[in-house]
Amino acid sequence: MWTTAQVSNATGTLAISLVLDGVRHWTCQHALTVAKRVAIDVQACGYNQTEPAAVAIVGQIAAKLADR
């Protein structure tokens, strides 16, 4: 079972964090945005995640699309 946090919407990117019940320190983050008419949907999981990895990856992909 997953426990979800509040959904955030920062600068057009939707994001939510999820924690796997019963597994210490295992978290995932799901992020979704649109850039240049392309939907970018990323889920990043790992132990002891302190930074919003999925949001960072979505931002990097969106920046690459903006350069085109």
Image (cartoon, grey):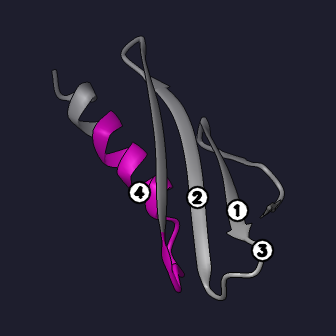
Q: Which mark is residue 44?
A: none
What's the distance in space between the residues labelled 3 and 1, CA to CA? 9 Å
Q: Position of residue 9 (x, y in %)?
A: 70, 44
Q: Amino acid at mark 3?
A: Asp
What's the distance in space between the residues labelled 4 and 3, CA to CA? 25 Å
Give the residue at mark 2: 29
Give the magenta-colored segment's residue range: 46-62
Give the residue at mark 1: 18
Give the residue at mark 4: 56
Q: Can you tell which of label 4 and label 3 is closer to the viewer?
A: 3
Q: Which corner quadrant holds the C terminus?
A: top left
Q: Can you tell which of label 3 and label 2 is closer to the viewer?
A: 3
What's the distance in space between the residues labelled 3 and 2, CA to CA? 15 Å
Q: Secondary structure at mark 4?
A: helix
Q: Amino acid at mark 2?
A: Gln
* Disc on the earlier residue, 2 or 1: 1
Q: Secondary structure at mark 1?
A: strand
What's the distance in space between the residues labelled 2 and 4, CA to CA? 11 Å
Q: Is residue 50 above or below residue 53?
A: below
Q: Amino acid at mark 1?
A: Leu
Residues at badges 2 and 1 in contact (C-beta under 8 Å)?
yes
- Number of numbered labels in the structure image: 4
Q: Secondary structure at mark 3?
A: loop
| Residue at 58% from the left image edge and 49% from the top image edge | 30
